[in-house]
Image (cartoon, coloured by chain):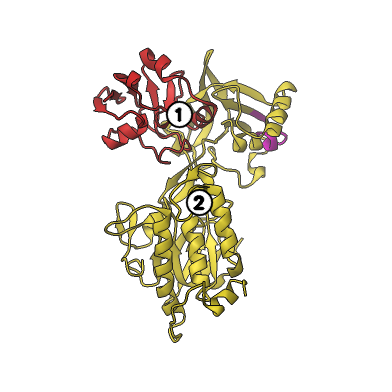
Amino acid sequence: MSNAPIETDVVIIGAGPCGLFAVFELGLLDIRCHLIDILDRPGGQCAELYPEKPIYDIPAYPIISGQELTDKLMEQIKPFEPEFHFNQRVDEIERLEDGRFHLKTDDNQEFITKIVVIAAGGGSFTPKRPPLPGIEEFENGSVHYSVRRMSDFAGKDLLIVGGGDSALDWTLNLAPIANSLTLVHRRDKFRAATDSVNKMLALREEGKINFLLGQMKEIKGENGNLSSVTISGPDGETEVACNRLLPFFGLTMKLGPVANWGLNLHENLITVDTEKFETNEKGIFAVGDINHYPGKLKLILSGFHEAALMAQKANQYIYPDKKVIFQYTTSSSSLQKKLGVK
Amino acid sequence: MPKITFIEHTGEAHEVEGDVGMTVMEVARKADVPGIEAECGGACSCATCHVYVDEAWTSKTGSPEEMEEDMLDFAFDVKGNSRLSCQIKVTEELDGLIVRTPEKQF
C-alpha cells in the first residue's frame, strides 16, 4: 500500500544520537524534520547495542547509559516536534527537477524534501544470516528473518531457531496457525521475557510444539523450497522436516542501499567536507559514524558538532533570503521561545 | 607481557603480546589478527569476537557469565569451550593462552 508522499524541509535518515541532535540544531533555525529508522525506536546503536552500557565521553556527563542519552536527547528535541517513521529503511533517493529529493522506503512511504541528512551510523541494522551453505537460495520464500504477515505461515511446518524474545514471541504467535512447529535452541535456557518462556514451556508440555536442543548444521531442499534442516545436538544429528525456517540470531549492521545513491565513498563511509558536512551531492549531508573526512573520529560528540555545522548550511538552502544572526540559547529570547522555556 | 596465540580455522597461528588488563579481543584487534570482528567494540552485545579456548586453558579463563552466555546464543557453532574474547581479561596467568577463531564470525 502506498501512502501520499510527505513534503518536508528535512529528512534525517537514522534516529541515533547524531540524527536526534540534528533535529535540535535544525529546530533552532526553524527547520522541522522527519526521521526514518529501521529500528522500532529511537537511539540507534545506543538503544540496540548498548542501552545499559555506560558511556564516559559525553561532555558534562561523567557517566551516562546509551538509553539515558537517548531519553535525554528525545527530551531536548521535543519542542521541535520531530516526526518519526520507524521500522523502515530508505531504499531510494532521487533528485527531482526542482532540486528537491524524492525518497522511498521499503514500506513504500515516499518523501519529498529539500534536504537529506544521512545519520545512519554503521548502516542499517539487518537480521543476521546464519552461515549455512546455500541458505540464500531459500530466502525467497522458505527462510524468513522477520514476520511481516502471519498468514504466510498458516498451515506450514515451521522451524524457529533462537532463544530470545523474537524466537519465543513468534513461537507463541505462530503455533496456533502452523501445521507443526519445532523450536530449536542451543541450550535449555532462554533469555526472553519470563512470561513468554513460561507460555512456551506450557505449549511444550501440552505437545503443541516440539523442542529440540541443538544448532543448525545443514539445510536441504530443492528449487528454493526448503524440505529439512539438520540439527546437531547432544544426542547426535536430527533431520527436521520443515518448509519454513525462521532463524533469530539478532542484528548486524550493513551499509545497505546507501551504497547505491551515487555518493562518493571511502571504505564504505560517505565522504564529506569539514565546513558543512555535505556530500558530493548538494543538499545531501552526512553526519556521525557514517561519514569520513581527514581526522575523523567516530565519537558521538564529533557527530554533534557535525550536526551543528550541517544545520547552518541547510538553513541557507531552505531560507536563502533569511539574514543569519548567530545566537546563543543562554541569552537569545527568540531561541528560548522556540525551546518553550520563555 | 603475556603471549597469546590465535589460531585461524585454516591452522595459521598468530602469536601476539598483550598487556595485563586488556581483553583478549583488544589484543587481537591491536595486532590485526584476522578472524575477530568485534563489531560492537567490546560491549558484549554482538558475538563477533567468538573464540574457542584451547581445552588446556579453559580452567584458567573460567566460564562465561550469564550476559556472555546469552550473547553466545547469537554466535554460530557454539561449543563447550566457546567464549567471547571481549570478556576474557589478560592476566599474567594467561601467558601462553591458545584460542582458535571460528571459520566465520557471524
Secondary structure of the residue carrying tag 2 is loop
- Asked if residue B83 shows in the view, the reply is yes
Q: CA distance from mark 2 to mark 1?
A: 25 Å
Q: Position of residue A223 (x, y in %)?
A: 47, 36
Crowding at label 2, few (<14), some or many (≥20) Cα neighbours within 10 Å? many
Chain A appears what colour?
Answer: yellow
Secondary structure of the residue carrying tag 1 is loop
Residue interval drawn in magenta:
A171-181
- Label 1: chain letter: B
The three-letter amino acid code for the residue at tag 2 is: Gly
Q: Position of residue A87 (x, y in %)?
A: 57, 53
The three-letter amino acid code for the residue at tag 1 is: Phe
Closer to us: mark 2 or mark 1?
Answer: 2
| Residue occupied by mark 2 | A44
- Label 2: chain letter: A
- Chain rendered red: B
| Residue occupied by mark 1 | B76
Quarter-wise, where is residue A198 in the image? top right
Crowding at label 1, few (<14), some or many (≥20) Cα neighbours within 10 Å? many
From this view, report whether residue A36 is shown above or below residue A267.
below
- Asked if residue A4 shows in the view, the reply is no
- Asked if labels 1 and 2 touch by Cβ distance under 8 angstroms, the answer is no
Residue at x 50%, y 75% (from the top left corner): A29
Q: Quadrant of the C terminus of chain A?
A: bottom right
Q: Left or right? Give the position of A100 relative to B17.
A: right
Is A264 in the magenta?
no
Q: Quadrant of the N terminus of chain A?
A: bottom right
Q: Left or right? Give the position of A208 relative to A228.
A: right
